[in-house]
Image: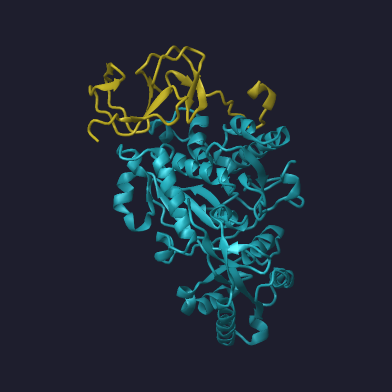
Amino acid sequence: MHKSINAYLRPDGRKGIRNILTVVYLVECAKHVAEQIVAPYREQGVQLIGFSGCYPNAYSQKMLQRLCTHSNVGGALLLSLGCEGFDRHSLKNAIAESGRPVDVLGIQQVGGTRKTIEAGRQAVEAMLSEMEKTPRVAMDPSEVIIGTICGGSDATSGITANPAIGHCFDAHVAAGGITIFEETGELIGCEPIMRDRATSPDLGAAIVECVGKAARYYDVMGHGSFAPGNADGGLTTQEEKSLGAYAKSGSSAISGIIKPGDQPSEGGLYLLDVVPDGEVRFGFPNINDNAEIAELIACGSHIILFATGRGSVVGSVISPVVKVCANPETYRHMSDDMDINAGRILEGVSSLAEVGEEIHDYTMKVAEGQPTCSEALGHQEFVLTYKHFEGAAGPSCFPG
Amino acid sequence: MKNSPPFIHLHPDDNVYVLIRTLPAGEALAIGETSYRFDCELCLGHKIAACAIEKGAKVLKYGMSIGIASQSIAQGDHVHLHNLESEYTHTFTLDEDRRYA
């Protein structure tokens, strides 16, 4: 059994495994100032996030609010130019209501770049001192929320890393934990199987509809789903390709569909619907892996399991990213970046179940504070773009 | 490692194995007591029938259907585009009843 984790207790009662101070630019025009404020404190858990757009957007507003009040986050400094469309007041209020220290600096108001950098660093120093006093609390391993994604995949991903993560997910759900998988666009063909795994017929129907939405969206985007190279790699059908990615979800029942920023409260396996609602607008649902990682984190993920075959190097702000390398050649070639060698399965030295157990054990060590490879290397990628979701996503997405 | 099979059985219900290393043309591949050889190289990731699969039966990988056998498949056959077809109609209007009936 895993021992309990020495977590950070937030005023809202949630528990974090890191104590991050986010410095948030609210428009691209404030990014340089925000970067300069962060630079001297990168080693002290001060991290840069933000939104580049000047036009307001409900999705990005919700995303930044969820990220700044994430359980791994202890405080936030918001950087505004002063004239952008982002609603800094409601973001500030939401963070303050969560009991976290928060401050807003307007560059036009403070008096330009140099003065704002200086004021920002003073604010960071004050908040870091306050955050040092964050109370600690015992956190049961089952309280850790785990998200998963695959990227830089190759022929090995679907036979080693992805199903091994599935084993880890099954173990975590069996212990009462929350797990989140995503990218309905890569699950096309799996919807009959997912429907049968849903905890209720209504949820099953919603899953089928959700994947249908993704298929329509990607069709409009002209995004091909099955490339000739897939067949060379031994994949025969669309559903087989999708199952390779789907294998990350394991075999637990699917408890609900969530949208970016929705945070499950009950243990179980959740499908994150990343594809925007309504007509196609703003471009691709997610422009790269980090956009999806940010959404998994906004849904509460403390840790992200990232399966890669060809070798992705990315990490993230806020929540540690664990690289599960599917291909043993890639693992040897890029070992500094890889946390787990799932490629051992191909060499006949470990079973899927053994690697799955190793991933789960390692995840708990990371929860206890051990840095992942991407954390140690300083990876803090973050991206947030425009999206549109209809209605107040949330309770209606949790049938029952 | 040399003696371990060159394939993995991803799920106990699967009727296919997946090659975990490239199998050179002519190299013997043992399934139980029987030995099989292939005329051409088969790369990592390709599928071999773990048992006989009747025409029209589901081909299972990860314990889930990846399509229907479009012809009878014998144990040890390479399973790919020539004998396996998607059940998935690649239509984006998603006529659910027709597809999943």
Q: Is residue A315 visible?
A: no
Q: Which residue is rendered at x = 59% and y = 72% of the image?
A: A135
Decide if residue B20 is on the left or right side of residue A198: left
Q: Count the labels in the image.
A: 0
Residue A6 vs residue A306, the one in the foreground = A6
Hey, which quadrant is residue A397 in on the image? top right
Q: Is residue A61 above or below residue A347?
A: below
Question: In the rendering, at what x and y percent does residue A190 appear?
Answer: 57, 33
Question: In the rendering, at what x and y percent does residue A128 appear?
Answer: 55, 79
Hey, which quadrant is residue A349 in on the image? top left
Decide if residue A276 is on the left or right side of residue B25: right
**Quarter of the C terminus of chain B within the rendering:** top right
In cyan, which chain?
A
Question: In the rendering, at what x and y percent does residue A32 appear?
Answer: 54, 75
Q: Is residue A348 above or below residue A152?
A: above
Residue A57 vs residue A131, the one in the foreground = A131
Q: Which residue is rendered at x = 66% and y = 51% of the image?
A: A264
In yellow, which chain?
B
**Quarter of the N terminus of chain B within the rendering:** top left
Residue A358 vs residue A83, the one in the foreground = A358
Q: Which residue is rendered at x = 72% and y = 59% of the image?
A: A58
Q: Is residue B79 visible?
A: yes
